[in-house]
């Protein structure tokens, strides 16, 4: 454990090791709300525009954001983080990084 942190109890350690042994399963993310889906669609349109102006702007923004995460607030209740990635596939298709 990190310095200054209390040790895990045997039950906590067993729970952690069982989770790792199970392949670190995670819950599926909840579906986006309608308002948040609309915002993501708008941003996707900006990043995936056909004109040279949009392509140049998208390249510039990507080069400055690729190490960061974007977060969007869903009417002030939920904050969801998004990672900006570049893919060879068109929008709406599975990512091919």
Image: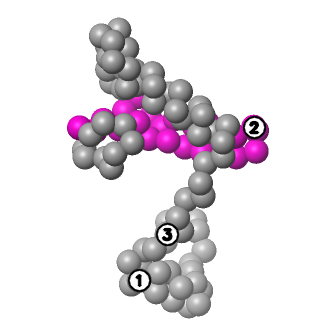
Residue at left 76%, top 38%? 76
Q: Earlier in the sequence, mark 2 or mark 1?
A: 1
- Tell me where residue 26 appears, x and y as whole percent: 49, 69
Measure the C-alpha gap from mark 2 to mark 3: 26 Å
Location of the C terminus by quadrant is top left
Name the residue that disc number 1 marks.
Answer: 22
Question: Please, what secondary structure does the residue beneath circle 2 have?
Answer: loop
Residue at left 59%, top 54%? 31
Q: Is residue 68 left or right of residue 33?
A: left
State the extent of the magenta-drawn residues as a range.
64-88
Question: Please, what secondary structure does the residue beneath circle 1 have?
Answer: loop
Kindly report which numbered mark, 2 or 3, lies closer to the viewer in this rendering: 2
Residue 85 colored in magenta in the image? yes
Q: Is residue 96 or residue 67 the one in the foreground?
A: 96
Label placed on residue 26:
3
Question: Quick one: label 2, few (<14), some, or many (20+) residues within 10 Å?
Answer: few
Residue 72 colored in magenta in the image? yes
- Tell me where residue 50 appears, x and y as whole percent: 33, 18
Q: Is residue 12 or residue 93 the one in the foreground?
A: 93
Residue at left 67%, top 37%? 35
Q: Earlier in the sequence, mark 2 or mark 3?
A: 3
Instruction: Report if residue 79 is visible in the image.
Output: no
Label placed on residue 75:
2
Question: Please, what secondary structure does the residue beneath circle 3 have?
Answer: loop
């Amino acid at each position: 454990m990190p310095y200054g942190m209390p040790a895990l109890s045997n039950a906590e350690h067993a729970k952690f090791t069982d989770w790792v042994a199970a392949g670190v399963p995670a819950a599926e993310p909840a579906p986006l709300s309608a308002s948040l889906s609309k915002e993501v669609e708008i941003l996707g349109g900006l990043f995936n525009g056909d004109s040279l102006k949009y392509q140049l702007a998208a390249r510039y923004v990507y080069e400055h954001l690729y190490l960061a995460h974007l977060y969007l607030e869903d009417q002030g209740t939920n904050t969801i983080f998004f990672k900006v990635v570049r893919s060879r596939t068109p929008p709406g298709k599975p990512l091919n990084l």
